[in-house]
Image: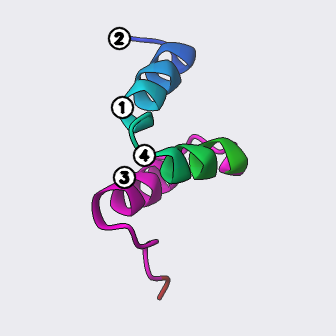
Amino acid sequence: MKNRKERKSELVQMLADNPAVLEQFYKDEIFTFKELRNIIHLYNTGQPVKKD
């Protein structure tokens, strides 16, 4: 199992080809499951997750 810092580093590498999403990831400074889901959705669709 990797530690939190390693997981964040790997995610940054994955998001590196989309500067806008990477910037949003750094700006949010939150590393929860919900935030990760939102960042991945933004990366895949270009749209933030719609809140209910």
Q: How far separated are the C-alphas under marks 2 and 3?
A: 21 Å
Relative side of 23 to 3, left or right: right
Determine whether the residue tagged by mark 4 lies in a helix, strand or loop: loop
Query: Which residue appears at 46% of the width and 71% of the height?
Result: 48
Q: Earlier in the sequence, mark 2 or mark 4?
A: 2
Within-10-Å neighbours for mark 1: few <14, some 14–19, many 20+: few
- Per the image, the residue denoted by label 2 is 1
Q: Is residue 26 magenta?
A: no
- Per the image, the residue denoted by label 3 is 40
| Camera-side mark, 3 or 1 | 1
Viewer-side residue, 12 vs 4: 12
Q: Mark 2–mark 3 contact, CB under 8 Å?
A: no
- Per the image, the residue denoted by label 4 is 18
- Per the image, the residue denoted by label 1 is 14
Q: Is residue 36 above or below residue 2?
A: below
Extreme residue in the bottom direction? 52
| Camera-side mark, 2 or 4 | 4
Determine whether the residue tagged by mark 3 lies in a helix, strand or loop: helix
Task: From the top left corner, tell me how far across and down residue 1 is, in percent.
Answer: 35, 11
The image quarter in which residue 26 lies: top right
Q: How far separated are the C-alphas under marks 2 and 4?
A: 27 Å
Relative side of 28 to 14, left or right: right
Task: From the top left corner, tell me how far across and down residue 7 is, in percent.
Answer: 45, 22
Viewer-side residue, 14 vs 30: 14
Label 4 sits on what residue type?
A: Asn
Q: Earlier in the sequence, mark 3 or mark 1?
A: 1
Please state the extent of the stretch shown in magenta in the rendering: 28-50
Query: Which residue appears at 44% of the width and 33% of the height?
Result: 16
Task: From the top left corner, tell me how far across and down residue 21 is, in percent.
Answer: 50, 51
Determine whether the residue tagged by mark 2 lies in a helix, strand or loop: loop
Query: Which residue appears at 68% of the width and 51% of the height?
Result: 28
